[in-house]
Amino acid sequence: MLLKGYTKKFLRVENNSNIVSLYCFADLHEDIGEVLPFLKEVFDEAVYSDETPFISFKIRGKKIMVYPRKIVIYALKDEEEADKILEWLKREINEAWEKRAEIEPSYEGAPKPKVLEILKLLPKTNCRECGEPTCMVFAAKIAEGAKGPTDCPPLREEKRINLQKYMETFQLEV
């Protein structure tokens, strides 16, 4: 068994539409970095990054990011849903590790969005309505998947759609 346990924390975030999202951060008791290339092959459409390293994928509409020492789950209903997903992931991680001889690992990293390309689509007003000090910082947050086009109130619909399409090319839903 590779992953024996984790400690979880929750964060509730209210967006500009007064919608509250629940995020779960699970600090892993063991380093699971070696299993990430195998997990990429287990989960359909998972994106692997060898730079940081991590894998990112969606299951039942939930974005999940798995790092060597952390798991992050976005947009949860409640803590019970997080518990179910974490226990399922723990089983999947341990099963992939035990079957690693049968799985062809993939070390191919995914292309990453470019902050300057994102910035070109933003209004560049540095208005701070998104909660960030500048549009450049906001663009960097979008590139890493922490923010999305709807978090920029002055962003016009056409550019919002263009930004969404650009990010979808990286399999990042924002």
Image (tube, helix red, strand yellow):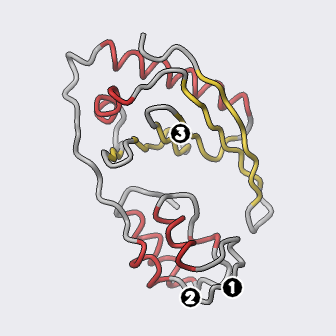
Q: Nearer the viewer, mark 1 or mark 3?
A: 1
Residue that badge 3 annotates: 60
Which is more toward the observer, 137 or 165? 137
**Circles 1 and 2 in contact, beta carbons < 8 Å:** yes
Q: CA distance from mark 3 to mark 2?
A: 33 Å
Mark 1 and mark 2: Cα distance apart in space: 9 Å
Label 1, label 3: how far apart the Cα atoms are: 35 Å
The kind of secondary structure element at disc 2 is: loop
Q: Judge from the rendering whether residue 99 lies leftward or rightward of residue 19; answer left or right.
A: left
At horizontal 58% and vertical 63% (from top left) the residue drawn is 147
Q: In the image, residue 130 lies at what x, y percent?
A: 68, 73
Say which amino acid is labelled 3: Arg
Q: Earlier in the sequence, mark 3 or mark 2?
A: 3
- Classify mark 3: residues with Cα within 10 Å, few (<14), some (14-19) or many (20+): few
Tell me the amino acid under the disc marked 1. Answer: Cys
Dot 1: element: loop
Q: Residue beneath label 1, please? A: 127
Give above or below for 20 relative to 150: above
Front in this rendered view, residue 5 or 82: 5
Q: Secondary structure at mark 3?
A: loop
Residue positioned 39% across, 78% down in the render: 117
Does residue 72 sit above or below 129 in this rendering? Answer: above
| Residue lying furthest top | 1
Point out the image quarter for the N terminus.
top left
The kind of residue on which mark 2 rests is: Pro
Image depth: mark 1 or mark 2 in front: 1
In the image, residue 77 lies at what x, y percent? 71, 40
Residue 154: percent from left, percent from top? 65, 85
From the image, tell me which residue sits under label 2. Answer: 123
Q: Residue at x 40, y 78 (%)?
A: 116
Badge 2 crowding class, 10 Å Cα cut-off, few under 14, some 14 to 19, many 20 or more, is some
